[in-house]
Image (tube, rainbow, N blue to C red):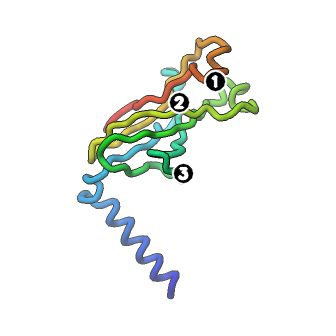
Amino acid sequence: MKCRTARILALSLAALASSPCFAAEWAWVMSIPHALSDEHVYKVKLLDIDGAPQKELIRYPVAAGSHTVTVELMLDVEWEPDLTESARAPAVKQLALEAVAGKSYLLAARVDVDAPAEAQLDQSYWEPVIYAVQ
C-alpha cells in the first residue's frame, strides 16, 4: 500500500511540475544536449546551484533572480583524449546567471582549441557560457 501511495504522489507532483502555471514561475537551467565541435562548444555537467549540490538531471528548476552555477567541462574525447584521461583535477568553473521565470538557459563550455599548453594547466582554455536562452 505504501508503494502505491508513493507512486500516486510522485505522479501527481510530476503532473503539477509540468503544468503551465508551475513552469511559468520557474526558470530552467540545463546543459546543451551534445557537443558542437565545429563551434568549439562542449557540454557541461551542473555540479551545484548557489552552493547546493545537484543530482544529475536533464534540467534544473531555479527561481527567478541571480544565481551562481558551478559546472564541470565535459570534453569531447575526439577533441583531446589526453585531457579527458589525465589524473588532473576536473575542470570546474562558476557562471553567474540572471534567471527570468519561464525561460530555459542552455549552458555550455566554449573551448579555445588553439590555447597554449599553459592554458590547460591553469584552466584558462575554457569558459562556461550561456549558449542559448529559450
Q: Are marks 2 and 1 in contact (CB under 8 Å)?
A: yes
Outermost bottom residue: 1
- Mark 3 sits on what residue? 56
* 71 over 18 or under it: above or below: above
Amino acid of disc 1: Trp
Looking at the picture, tell me which residue is in the foreground, 124 or 37.
Answer: 124
Snapshot quadrant of residue 104: top left
Left or right of 18 in this view: 38 = right
Q: Earlier in the sequence, mark 3 or mark 2?
A: 2
Residue in view at x 67 percent, y 14 percent: 117
Residue count near mark 2 (Cα–Cα under 10 Å), binned few <14, some 14–19, many ≥20? many
- Mark 1 sits on what residue? 79
Residue count near mark 1 (Cα–Cα under 10 Å), binned few <14, some 14–19, many ≥20? few
Looking at the picture, tell me which residue is in the foreground, 49 or 113.
Answer: 49
Left or right of 63 in this view: 111 = right
Snapshot quadrant of residue 100: top left
For discs 3 and 1, the disc positioned in front in the rendered view: 3
- Mark 2 sits on what residue? 42
Position in image of residue 21 (x %, y %): 23, 59
Tell me the distance, in whole angstroms, between the alpha carbons under discs 2 and 1.
10 Å
Tell me the distance, in whole angstroms, between the alpha carbons under discs 3 and 1.
24 Å
Amino acid of disc 2: Tyr
